[in-house]
């Protein structure tokens, strides 16, 4: 019964999205304020019914209702309850419902949190989001019904959740990632509404900014969790593979980064208007493209869902309608003449322009690399695969170009700056950064030129921020009042840029300094790695809730002192019989020690073991967390709310005047 | 070129992309090269078919060779089998990976149809197959003298595949061979 209620609720939500996409949009066109005023309630109603639907599916999973096909093939009665719950989105149908739920959530959030938006704009924005919701709910209902029953002949037990997904990181990774992906739909909807209304002014940029920041923050967290999960779950110590699906999440992030910076220029200076609108369309289109790549089966990937050409066709048509439609609208409605506002080459605007160029090139590079195998195949030229060498070769120089500009950004001024002021401002930071770049890598022999470069760039970034910070405090009457005057959006920028610096250091240090050994070890053996002594004590049999495992016991010491006990496992999941490697990690701020089991070798109890020493790998994820915190902080800036109050007051004045 | 024209550029590029994606729906990406290309064959310890020996990576590496994934349940393998014997007669080293199969059935197959393999690894559970990323039998991997996977062919190896694809690579590896 419950699955039927869920199915029915989804149908109702679908009908509501149909009304939401049409009636308020019609109202906005004809100036019918009754039709427009329906939009917020419809948005909230849509959320309520999708949530009911989702809750029903979750209930079916938690109650082991194996008569539901999805539950039967993706869950198992032995599965711990938390994984039964996360199994809801550990498959194509359920994750699509999660997409719809999050989209409904964002739509309702816009409806509830923007009473100050002019009704005309709000109804257009919500209509656009309703139209996107139509697509996803139709996709779910017509091609991927999560509530399909297996009747008669429901199995006694389910086929189990893919063991790779039975992991704490994977419980929250998809929801965070989808919050990011789908969150870009808000910026997209604002951009479309602005194009429809023909008013591309600073106000739409100001309205979109907090939403874009929040979505970008979630996306950063989602990508970071995915990378962290790959690191400890896949068992070979890699944290980024340039896999098509990773790229699918990385491309909207890159485009989103460009969008955030371009929105700043549009809001503050009224510049780059058409460009910013295009980026908003681009960021969300890349989210949709990612969905297409993951679910259509056009590319192979460890992440790809079981695929079906009908689904691929559906989402391609949807993609064509949404992206093609919005780009057509853009072509006809975007202002063709560049803004009259000018700026000097030496100014913050030109630095933001550099940021945009770098991130756009980066996005297109990843897009091209991801699609290249497909393009070659489509032209009948054979099969190729594009690997990390291509991506690294393009990415490293791009980032090396970006950071110097990033360091200058905060100290620069809008509109017109002068070179001699920059020289004076950045003299000390440059000198100190060069010093750091030369000396800090000396702490780790042998001297590594890439790490030196990374330290140089990151400390330049850090010192540029410090210089600016100091400057701001110095101009204030007292330190306390100076700190008070700094806005959350300033803090957000500082934190996010620091996060980026931490990421750069983490990535370069871990790629350059990591040591790994693949070797055969017998119980009792000891191996030395980067100054740590790994002693293999024994192999034990352990039993988990739904698996049995061989567990190796390691003791790690350094100069005779105990450091950690590491117990990697080789698990065999009972329901599916699949074998999984569970690495054991001793995490630290400056280094990770990592042991993963390979295969048993010979008959005398020896195993192939992978020992890794990974310096500073945590900095990368810490950096991503800082970036997200920065984005959230910036979105919390009072400025956005204050502006709202002001617009509310003025719109009320207009109403009263009328 | 009017100023409005450049605003159509994104739409135009997207249209091109959509065509590629549309074509992509009708292609099979699973025919992709293995992720292990240019990476060493994973280490393993598995029993030899028809013997008590334990085989490891060292037993099948050391010279340029083919590693053929086969099984008695695989119909295409039966098609492929005679050609593998011809290759073996020409002196091409071929190692077998008997994939998710029963030893007795596999032994009977070799007794009846002949044995082109130098050695056969009995991968009853398919663990090595998982490490290799096997999609299904038959598959053939070309290993160089250092045991690095150089090429992967999914599907039947026949005269055409051998002559146009595998043999040139095999010759190249053979001549460029350095002692391990």
Image (tube, coloured by chain):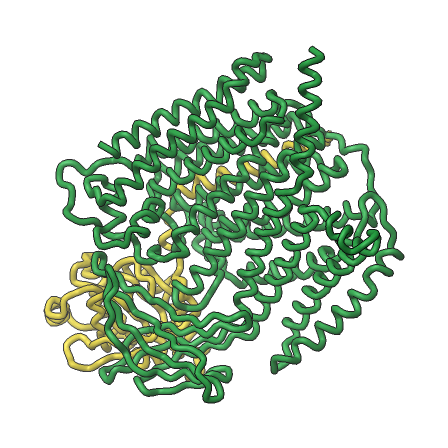
Chain colours: A green, B yellow
Note whether B57 is above or below B15 in the view shown. Answer: below
Note whether A58 is above or below A650 in the view shown. Answer: below
Relative horizontal placement of residue A540, taking residue A106 as reference (left or right): left
Q: Quadrant of residue A383?
A: bottom left
Residue at x 54%, y 69% (from the top left corner): A589
Q: Nearer the viewer, residue A586 or A399?
A: A586
Relative horizontal placement of residue A587, taking residue B113 as reference (left or right): right
Residue at x 34%, y 41% (from the top left corner): A94
Residue at x 32%, y 83% (from the top left corner): A537
Q: Position of residue B89 (x, y in %)?
A: 24, 74
Note whether A280 is above or below A611 in the view shown. Answer: above
Q: Check the picture and name the quadrant holding the C terminus of chain A.
A: top right
Q: Nearer the viewer, residue B137 or A87?
A: A87
Q: Position of residue A533 (x, y in %)?
A: 44, 85
Q: Position of residue A325 (x, y in %)?
A: 54, 28
Note whether B89 is above or below A189 in the view shown. Answer: below
Q: Position of residue A515 (x, y in %)?
A: 50, 77
Q: Can you see residue B123?
A: yes
């Amino acid at each position: 019964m419950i699955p039927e209620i869920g199915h029915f609720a989804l149908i109702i939500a679908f009908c509501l999205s149909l009304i939401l996409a049409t009636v308020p949009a019609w109202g906005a066109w004809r100036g019918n304020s009754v039709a427009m005023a329906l939009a917020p309630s419809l948005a909230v109603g849509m959320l309520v019914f999708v949530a009911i639907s989702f809750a029903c599916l979750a209930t079916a999973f938690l109650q082991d209702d194996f008569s539901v096909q999805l539950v039967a093939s993706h869950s198992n009665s032995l599965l711990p309850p938390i994984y039964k719950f996360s199994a809801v989105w550990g498959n194509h149908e359920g994750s699509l419902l999660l997409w719809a739920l999050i989209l409904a959530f964002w739509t309702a959030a816009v409806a509830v949190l923007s009473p100050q938006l002019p009704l005309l704009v709000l109804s257009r924005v919500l209509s656009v989001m309703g139209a996107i919701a139509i697509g996803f709910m139709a996709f779910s209902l017509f091609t991927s019904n999560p509530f399909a029953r297996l009747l008669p002949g429901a199995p006694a037990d389910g086929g189990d959740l893919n063991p790779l997904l039975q992991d704490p990181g994977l419980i929250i990774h998809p929801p965070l990632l989808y919050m990011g992906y789908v969150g870009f739909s808000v910026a997209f909807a604002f951009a479309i509404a602005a194009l429809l209304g023909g008013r591309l002014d600073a106000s739409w940029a100001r309205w979109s900014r907090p939403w874009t920041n929040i979505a970008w923050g979630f996306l950063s967290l989602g990508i970071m969790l995915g990378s962290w999960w790959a690191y400890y779950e896949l068992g070979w110590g890699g944290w980024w593979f340039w896999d098509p699906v990773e790229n699918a999440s990385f491309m909207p992030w890159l485009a989103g980064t460009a969008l955030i910076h371009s929105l700043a220029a549009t809001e503050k200076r009224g510049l780059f208007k058409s460009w910013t609108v295009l980026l908003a369309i681009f960021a969300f289109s890349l989210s949709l493209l990612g969905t297409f790549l993951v679910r259509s089966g056009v590319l192979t990937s460890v992440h790809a869902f079981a695929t079906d050409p009908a689904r691929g066709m559906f989402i391609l048509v949807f993609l064509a309608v949404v992206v093609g439609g919005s780009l057509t609208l853009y072509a006809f409605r975007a202002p063709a003449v560049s803004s009259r506002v000018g700026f000097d080459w030496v100014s913050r605007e030109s630095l933001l322009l550099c940021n945009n160029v770098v991130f756009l090139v980066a996005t297109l590079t990843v897009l091209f690399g991801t699609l290249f195998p497909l393009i070659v195949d489509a032209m009948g030229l054979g099969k190729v695969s594009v690997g990390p060498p291509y991506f690294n070769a393009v990415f490293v120089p791009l980032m090396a170009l970006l950071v110097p500009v990033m360091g200058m950004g905060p100290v620069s001024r809008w509109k017109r700056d002068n070179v001699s002021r920059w020289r004076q401002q950045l003299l000390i930071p440059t000198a100190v950064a060069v010093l750091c770049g030369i000396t800090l890598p000396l702490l780790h022999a042998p001297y590594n030129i890439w790490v030196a470069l990374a330290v140089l760039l990151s400390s330049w970034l850090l010192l540029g921020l410090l210089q600016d910070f100091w400057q701001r405090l110095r101009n204030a009457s007292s330190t306390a009042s100076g700190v008070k005057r700094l806005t959350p959006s300033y803090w957000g920028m500082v934190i996010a840029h620091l996060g980026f610096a931490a990421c750069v250091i983490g990535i370069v240090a871990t790629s350059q300094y990591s040591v790994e050994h693949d070797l055969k070890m017998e119980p009792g053996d000891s191996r030395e790695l980067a100054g740590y002594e790994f002693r293999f004590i024994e192999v034990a049999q352990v039993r988990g809730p739904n698996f049995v495992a061989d567990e190796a016991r390691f003791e790690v010491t350094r100069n005779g002192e105990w450091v950690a006990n590491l117990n990697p496992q080789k698990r065999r999941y009972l329901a599916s019989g699949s074998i999984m490697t569970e690495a054991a990690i001793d995490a630290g701020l400056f280094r990770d020690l990592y042991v993963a089991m390979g295969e048993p070798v010979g008959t005398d109890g020896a195993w192939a073991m992978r020992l890794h020493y990974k310096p500073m790998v945590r900095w990368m994820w810490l950096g991503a967390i800082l970036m997200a915190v920065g984005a959230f902080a910036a979105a919390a800036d009072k400025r956005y709310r204050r502006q709202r109050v002001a617009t509310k007051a003025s719109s009320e004045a207009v109403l009263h005047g009328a | 070129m009017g100023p409005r024209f450049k605003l159509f550029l994104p739409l135009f590029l997207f249209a091109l992309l959509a065509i590629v994606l549309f074509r992509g729906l009708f292609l099979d990406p699973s025919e992709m090269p293995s992720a292990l290309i240019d990476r060493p064959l994973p280490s393993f310890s598995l029993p030899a078919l028809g013997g008590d020996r334990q085989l490891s990576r060292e037993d099948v590496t050391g010279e340029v060779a083919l590693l053929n994934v086969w099984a008695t349940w695989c119909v295409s393998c039966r098609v492929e089998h005679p050609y593998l014997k011809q290759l073996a007669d020409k002196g091409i080293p071929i190692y077998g990976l008997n994939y998710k199969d029963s030893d007795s059935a596999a032994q009977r197959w070799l007794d009846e149809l002949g044995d082109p393999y130098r050695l056969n690894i009995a991968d009853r559970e398919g663990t090595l197959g998982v490490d290799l990323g096997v999609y299904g039998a038959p598959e053939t991997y070309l290993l160089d003298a250092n045991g690095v996977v150089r090429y992967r062919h999914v599907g039947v190896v026949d005269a055409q595949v051998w002559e146009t694809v595998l043999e040139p690579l095999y010759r190249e590896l053979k001549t460029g061979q350095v002692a391990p």
